[in-house]
Image (spheres, rainbow, N blue to C red):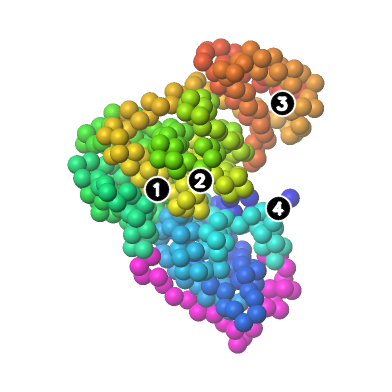
Amino acid sequence: MRAFFGTDGIRGLANKHPMTVEVATRLGKAITLHFAREGHEPKILIGKDPRRSGYMFESALAAGINSMGGFVLYTGPLPTPGIAYLTTGMRCDAGIVISASHNPHHDNGIKIFGADGFKLPDEEEAKLEALLQDDAALQAATQPTQIGRSRRIDDATGRYIVFLKTLFPKQYNLEGLRIVVDCAHGAAYKTTPAVMWELGAEVISTGVEPDGVNINEGVGALHPEHCAKLVREYRADLGISLDGDADRVILIDEHGEVVDGDQLMAIAALSLKSRGALAQDTVVATVMSNLGLELALREHSISLLRTQVGDRYVVEEMRKGGYNLGGEQSGHLIFLDHATTGDGTIGALAALAAMVRSGKPLSELAKVMKRLPQVLENVRVRERRPIESLKQAPAVIAKVEAELGSSGRVLVRYSGTELKCRVMLEGTDGPRLEVLVAEICDAIRAEIGA
């Protein structure tokens, strides 16, 4: 059982364990020691989103790194994918992101990229966690004559903006398009509006006034209704709704309707395949992606591979199989030809490129996928006993699967953070799905319900 690292780095309430200044300082030391080698000064990039606690964690991490002889490069507020990009571009040993993504301002988190720009694998995080708790090793490596230094990268935002623009087809621009950009008062408040404007669009910006506590508050990818309202009000062609660290995106079509990550993957997959650029004619998504995505891709002879929930697992499968497009329903879109992690702005640019190439509005492109009704219910449980070991539930699940056949899907899994069992069904008949979900939930509740 890990004491610090979860599924996406370390995360929690700021000023409460493990998200404390003391832990951050020790983590800075552990990271430096982990990446140290003879005759080499570890170079570590630190970036963050604008939440208030980011400043103290930035200072604490830097203090730990410097105390072990490491060289700190500060980017200031920058999207998570921008920090991954600069980590590789500046030949750093590691990159650190201080962000709690879509969470409220009082939360914060720390995640780490390796020199290749990818999130550290589980085994590397396990080594860091061991070092983090090894007083003797950290103390022995601290020398009065080997204190490191720090430097601020003043043009970090500009570098990332230029990189993003290079990904849009050079023969096209965004002239004539009116775009609403909602940055959630988060890390992309300077970058994404600038990218869209410099490519020629008329930009209406919102969520671009971070004050340290308003991040994700009623705006951004968790609240696409805010962006949708502005799209309708300004009669815009598109709305871009990012989360706090801008690694995910939800788009709004010209009618003010939400276009989620599944629909965006379908649009991107068809666009890539039409140009012979979809690696192995395969898309990687999680078990939570709608069955409608799988059916839409199948119609175009594109395979869908599913992983457990979490963008890191999508990336792992993509790297293992040599695939270049993947993502999550929530809006994490990974274009592995261009980025090492989810990038909301790249996802938006991919949809815009498809619009410009085809001459079709987003609403037309989104019709490629028909979303099937999806019913989800959580059952509180007292233990996470393997589902297959229960007495009644497996038979009930098998009966439901047989009834739904190839036109539906059953997913039963435990939450990784709470004592809950999540039961999700998809199919063509919404009311019937609710009845079937209740049957499975009752069977689980009867045996291990809390």
Cα separation between marks 2 and 4: 31 Å
Q: Earlier in the sequence, mark 2 or mark 4?
A: 4
Q: Earlier in the sequence, mark 3 or mark 4?
A: 4
136 to the left or right of 240: right
Farthest bottom residue in view: 145
Q: Helix or strand or loop: what does disc 3 sit on?
A: loop
Q: Which amino acid type is shown beneath numbered disc 4?
A: Arg
**Mark number displayed over residue 2:** 4
Q: Which amino acid type is shown beneath numbered disc 2?
A: Asn
In the image, which is nearer the foreground, mark 2 or mark 1? 2
Q: Helix or strand or loop: what does disc 2 sit on?
A: loop
Residue, x 59% and y 35% (percent of image)? 306
Q: Residues within 10 Å of mark 4 (few under 14, many from 20)?
A: few
Q: Residues within 10 Å of mark 3 (few under 14, many from 20)?
A: some
| Residue 352 x/y as whole percent | 32, 41
Is the residue 271 above or below the residue 64 in the image?
A: above
Q: Which amino acid type is shown beneath numbered disc 3?
A: Gly
Q: Earlier in the sequence, mark 3 or mark 1?
A: 1
Cα separation between marks 3 and 4: 26 Å
> Mark 2 = which residue?
324
Is the residue 425 above or below the residue 63 in the image?
A: above
Residue 296 forms part of the magenta stretch? no
| Residue 325 x/y as whole percent | 49, 42
Per the rendered image, the range of residues in magenta is: 132-157
Do labels 3 and 1 touch, CB within 8 Å?
no
> Mark 3 = which residue?
449
Residue sitting nearer the eye, 155 or 182:
155
